[in-house]
Amino acid sequence: MSNKLIALALATVLPALSAAAEPGSLKGTWSFTANAGVDLDVAGKVHDSGTGSVLKLPTSVTEKSFREIYNTPLRWRLEMGYGVSDRMELLADLLYSKVSAKLVRVGDVAGLDLNAKFDDYREVGWSLGARYFLTSSGRLRPHVTAWATMSRLDKISATFTVPAAGVTLADTSFYDKSVVYGGGADLGLRYRLSKHLCVGASAGLRYQTKPKGLEGLAGTGLENLNDVGSRVYAPIAVSTIIHF
């Protein structure tokens, strides 16, 4: 009798546990996602090239990309989503990024090395997006996501030095506090561990407009160095997702 009772209990409980672990419908559910990743710079310059005069000496500057000036950016994002169908979520997120700069040779003054160290690149912003899953069910679900972004960048100054001459131009204003816009798309995978918990990974491509330039180099002939500043970068992230 006891064996029959155990069998009956298992026959009742196991299907229920299995159903609880199966992916449910996305429609009408909310999700909370924590993302951590890096932004790999693809294109874009921190400053352009040019020639001019510093301290009445001939000066030449070579253009430098974001990858040359800054370390690899780490980015943190908190995302909320709402399922409007079994395959589509509408999204909103908050993001934060802080990137330190390297000390870089950017040109020369009268044949002597000209170095620069820029302020940290600090970004706080938000995005709106839509995610479309390529399958309507299953534990492993590939997806594509489109984003529109708006971010606020802190002011950026630079300290220029000519070590051989003992010359330092500290806190030279370069970019002002700015609101920049952008957009892009991601490809990703999501794997459901349980009814309420998933993990994921994604990679994509983004474009971001340039910040507002400042005239810290006025009178040197190098005023146009900061007429650039837009970026193209590839975000790569891993995610933990909670559904409720």
Image (cartoon, grey):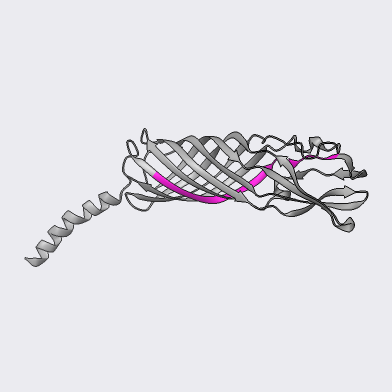
Q: Residue at x 79, y 35 (%)?
A: 224
Residue that extends furthest to the bottom in the rendered view of this protein: 2
Q: Is residue 81 rendered magenta in the image?
A: no
Q: Residue at x 54, y 46 (%)?
A: 96
Picture layout, residue 40 above or below residue 88: below
Question: For this view, does 37 lie left or right of residue 14?
Answer: right
Query: Where is residue 11 drawn, in percent x and y?
Result: 17, 56
* Residue 49 placement (x, y as % from top left): 82, 40
Q: Residue furthest left?
A: 1
Left-right relation of 89 to 222: left
Q: Residue at x 33, y 46 (%)?
A: 23
Residue 86 x %, y %: 36, 36
Task: Give residue 89's quadrant in the image.
Answer: top left
Secondary structure of the magenta portion, mostly? Answer: strand
Residue 107 x %, y %: 85, 48
Q: Nearer the viewer, residue 13 or 113?
A: 113
Q: Quadrant of residue 214?
A: top right
Q: On screen, 81 above or below 167?
A: above
Boundaries of the magenta span: 32-50
The answer to whether any part of residue 73 appears in the image is: no
Q: How many marks?
A: 0
Looking at the image, is 147 positioned above or below residue 140? above
Residue plotted at (65% across, 39% down) = 232
Q: Quadrant of the N terminus?
A: bottom left
Quadrant (top left, top right, bottom left, bottom right) of the C terminus: top left
For residue 25, which quarter of the picture?
top left
Left-right relation of 50 to 144: right
Q: Nearer the viewer, residue 221 or 170?
A: 170
Q: Is residue 42 visible?
A: yes
Residue 52 as seen in the image, left or right of residue 125: right
